[in-house]
Amino acid sequence: SDQIPQDGRQFDHLFADGETFTIGKLSVQVMHTPGHTPACLTYVIGDAAFVGDTLFMPDYGSARCDFPGGSAETLYHSVQRIFALPEETRLFVCHDYKAPGRDEYRWESTVAEEKAHNIHLGNHRSLADFVELRQKRDATLAMPKLILPALQVNIRAGELPPKEDNGVAYLRIPLNAV
């Protein structure tokens, strides 16, 4: 049986909150922003922050929190850390689902724009209100179509599962999940 390590040793390096590293001449600060998943990070580079799935465009809101280890309460606190960055900080999102009424994709907002207009977290929404909103919304969402194959590759740091005796690697899908 293929035992996948649960301690992260399959990865080259696990970043700690507050750690810095460089990409060429750029200095990158790591901000742990869990909630969508326990491993979510935001990378702050100068006046820009790459927020992954923590936040979406203001008219779409925030990431779901019903994945393994996800937590609406934790996501709320992570977003407050992002909101504490300077208001002019440019925020780059991982996905844009084009909220109803918007025809073009967007990938950049600012801390000020998110704080004022994010439909899930903006305008000083309380923790209790956000948790209620997020949990109700998450209960209506279907499982993403590619989540099971993606998890099997992601947890192996991008590697496919080991090959079987016939020389072929397989992604496994539970029969009750299709």
Image (tube, rainbow, N blue to C red):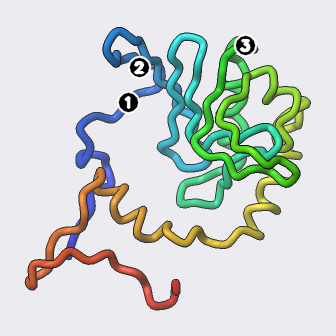
Q: Which residue is mark 3?
A: 88
Q: Residue furthest front?
A: 103
Picture residue at 80% right of the left edge, 20% below the top: 112
The 10 Å Cα crowd at callout 2, few under 14, some 14 to 19, many 20 or more, is few
Q: Which mark is residue 19?
A: 2
Up-down relation of residue 175 to residue 153 (above or below): below
Q: Is residue 8 left or right of residue 127?
A: left
What's the amino acid at mark 1?
A: Phe
Q: CA distance from mark 1 to mark 3?
A: 26 Å
Q: Are marks 3 and 2 in contact (CB under 8 Å)?
A: no
Picture residue at 69% right of the left edge, 43% below the top: 105
What's the amino acid at mark 3?
A: Glu
Q: Which mark is residue 15?
A: 1
The 10 Å Cα crowd at callout 3, few under 14, some 14 to 19, many 20 or more, is few
Q: Are marks 1 and 2 in contact (CB under 8 Å)?
A: yes
What's the amino acid at mark 2?
A: Glu
Picture residue at 47% right of the left edge, 25% below the top: 17
Q: Earlier in the sequence, mark 3 or mark 2?
A: 2
Up-down relation of residue 135 to residue 167 (above or below): above
Q: Residue 91, image x and y in percent?
A: 65, 26
Q: Residue 156, image x and y in percent?
A: 28, 56
Q: Residue 155, image x and y in percent?
A: 35, 56
Q: Secondary structure at mark 1?
A: loop
Q: Residue 16, image x and y in percent?
A: 41, 27
Q: How many marks?
A: 3
**In the rendered image, which quarter contains the N terminus?**
bottom left
Up-down relation of residue 133 to residue 121 (above or below): below
Q: Nearer the viewer, residue 21 or 77?
A: 21
Q: CA distance from mark 1 to mark 2?
A: 6 Å
Q: Secondary structure at mark 2?
A: loop
- Looking at the rendered image, the disc whose residue lies closer to the viewer, 1 or 3, is 3
